[in-house]
Amino acid sequence: MYERTPPGAEGRIVPITFALGLGTFLTLFDVTAVVVAMPGIAKDLGFAVAGAAWVIDAYSLAFTGALLASGALADRFGRRRSMLTGNAVFLVASIACGLATDGPMLLASRVVQGVGAAFMVTGAIALVAGAFPNLAERARAFGMIGVLSGVAMALGPTLGGLLASWFGWRWIFYANIPFCLSLTLLVPRVVAETNDPDGPPLDPVGVALLTISLGLAIDALLRRDGSLAIRAACLAGSAMAAFLFVLQQWHSSRPVLDPRVFATSAMAGVGALLTAIQFGYWAVLVYLPLFLSAGLLVSMEVAGAALLAATLPMLLVPLIGGCFVTQWGWRRFFVVAFGIIAVGDALLALAAVSTNPAMRLAATITGMLTIGVGSALANPQMSSVVLALAPPTQTGMASAVTMIVRQAGFAISIAALGATLTRTDMTTAFAAPFALATLAALAAIVAAVILLPAKSSQKDVAS
């Protein structure tokens, strides 16, 4: 049985969308805000570079693995129930993060937070589709949620830096409490329950294989105290688990994550771009506060404000990105966007090796602004490309695959950049991760030229 929102819900698009978008806001805010607090967390809990990276990756890894299960469980037991359950888990885990007295407790709490976030996001997205069967209203709702997501990404580092400077890093997690409580009260009042018992089945084997694959790869990249043989074994195990996951999903009659979505060259190109932007922008954001602290000797509060140069374009630039896609086509558009990202990452690498303080400052600010503009152009349009290239019967699956690729790429890119960062108290050490980010952006340009169609309409692609 599938229930719809009662008649008249169309006139409540703002409260419904705000209630559902608030969950997405929280899950993104908790990534970007924590980024600025990483130096303080590492100092208080005794984390090295690898441990600091795991604070982000523990959340992302759990989020990615739980996405596969959360969609099936939400369909079966109710999307609103799934979102509210995820919200409750997220609330408890946030409090546990704030109370953490050592590294293992914080990492375990972050894992639970990631699981809760997955249920919140999948429940919210499904509820939007159920609340607004009209495509135009659904597009408006998703647009409003996109604005809230942009605010979380743009202002998260600044607000996180202020909270960490004024009250301590633990208050970044405690700040979730009033929002989670608001969701608990608001969602049941404005959003009706929906479910779909005939949705995709729960796939515990798939969840386990994907999580094992990502976990082994991240551990291999961040493991600094293990031998080369151990790290190679972890990478081999990761590759084997990934192969088994793809094989299992490929032969499943009802896959929860169909690998055929990326079977065409154009969709493979989109997958490459989705991964590259994690390296070229999102993972760079994780290490920028550490670089600002070492290279410019600034506080968390100042670092959070400085990161506005890299994040504020996410609120402004996407408004003009659609116009450029229409004029240039996908291939040219993404070549330009990732070219801008590559230039920005290269400027950050130049800042890391510069011995002139004035030049280092100028290259840092310019580099952050440049990667922000490039990413703000590319990031929103990737979802449009996926929906345009995917067959109409696979748009839902394509969106799910895209979300998994984004989250998995984010976790791997953080680990990969962290593996190249030998120490955080020397400015020149940051040249290596910034150079790796530059190479990833350049690889995206090659992928766009070779794999993406020149035109930007599905009709042209099909022809």
Image: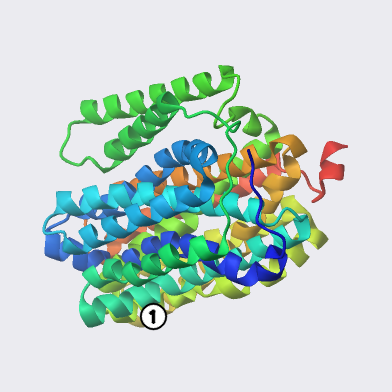
Which one is nearer the viewer's eye here, 306 or 171?
171
The location of residue 222, given as percent across then percent down, is 26, 43
Left or right of 390, for residue 411: left
Question: Would residue 354 be seen by someone viewing this image from the given angle?
Answer: yes
Give the residue furthest to the top.
Answer: 251
In the picture, the quarter occupied by the C terminus is top right
Tell me which corner region of the image, top left, top right, bottom left or bottom right, holds residue 137. Answer: bottom right
Q: Residue at x 35, y 72 (%)?
A: 178
Which residue does the image show at 70% across and 38% down from the upper left? 266
User: Which element is circle 1 on?
Assistant: helix
- Of residues 173 and 54, the one drawn nearer to the viewer in this rendering: 173
Does residue 382 appear in this view? no
Question: How packed is label 1: few (under 14 Cα within 10 Å), some, or many (20 or more)?
Answer: some
Q: Is 111 located above or below residue 172 in the figure?
A: above
Residue sitting nearer the eye, 100 or 164: 100
Q: Position of residue 298 (x, y in %)?
A: 27, 79
- Where residue 150 sits in the image (x, y, percent)? 54, 68
User: Which amino acid type corresponds to the residue marked 1 in the rendered image?
Assistant: Ala
Q: Where is mark 1, residue-wise?
A: 305
What residue appears at the point 33 percent right and 64 percent down from the top-left corner? Answer: 35
Q: Report the coloring of the rendering.
A: rainbow
- Front-most of residues 95 and 269: 95
Query: In screen coordinates, is 218 left or right of 330?
Result: left
Task: Count numbered badges in the picture.
Answer: 1
Please state if 45 lies on the left or on the right of 276 as rendered.
left
Residue 46 as seen in the image, left or right of residue 199? left
Q: Could you say where residue 369 lies in the image, as x and y percent from the top left?
A: 51, 73
